[in-house]
Image (cartoon, helix red, strand yellow):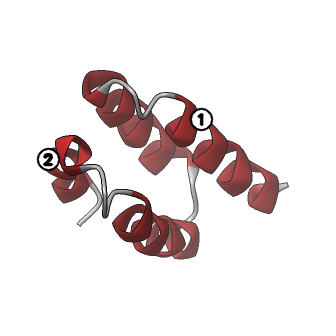
Amino acid sequence: MARAMFEYTKTILMKVSFNSELFCKELEKSLKRLLPYEIKELSIWLKHFTANKPELNYCLPLIA
């Protein structure tokens, strides 16, 4: 079940990536739901996902 939440989180973040405010809000919510090792995985995924989306980079300190 926990793995499903991780995949769900990635899906939601991809869908709201058009709006940086929504992206940050969903990222904050996901940090409350995910397990510590999933947050580390999410951090790695986010670095790759936001590599060509500079408007989302200001949300990354939330996960650090």
Q: Secondary structure at mark 2?
A: helix
- Decide: few, some or many residues near mark 1? Use Cα within 10 Å; few <14, some 14-19, many ≥20: some
| Residue beneath disc 1 | 12
Instruction: Left or right? Give the position of 27 relative to 35.
Output: left
Q: Which mark is residue 58?
A: 2
User: Residue 58 in the image: x percent, y percent?
Assistant: 14, 47
Give the residue displayed 19% in from the left and 52% down from the top. 57
**Three-letter residue code for mark 2:** Tyr
Looking at marks 2 and 1 on the same chain, the residue that comes earlier in the sequence is marked by 1
**Three-letter residue code for mark 1:** Ile
- Quarter of image, res 33: top right
Q: Which mark is residue 59?
A: none
Can you say which quadrant of the picture contains the C terminus?
bottom left
User: Residue 9 in the image: x percent, y percent?
Assistant: 61, 45
16, above or below 45, in the image: above
Instruction: Left or right? Give the position of 39 relative to 6.
Output: left
Compare residues 33 and 19 and report the one nearer the observer: 19
Can you say which quadrant of the picture contains the N terminus?
bottom right
Count of numbered marks: 2
28, above or below 60, in the image: above
Instruction: Left or right? Give the position of 46 relative to 5.
Output: left
Compare residues 2 and 45 and report the one nearer the observer: 45
User: Residue 5 in the image: x percent, y percent?
Assistant: 72, 49
Q: Secondary structure at mark 1?
A: helix
User: Residue 37 in the image: x percent, y percent?
Assistant: 55, 76
Compare residues 11 and 25 and report the one nearer the observer: 11
- Decide: few, some or many residues near mark 2? Use Cα within 10 Å; few <14, some 14-19, many ≥20: few
Give the residue displayed 57% in from the left and 68% down from the top. 38
Taking the view exactly as shown, the residue that stands out farthest to the front is: 52
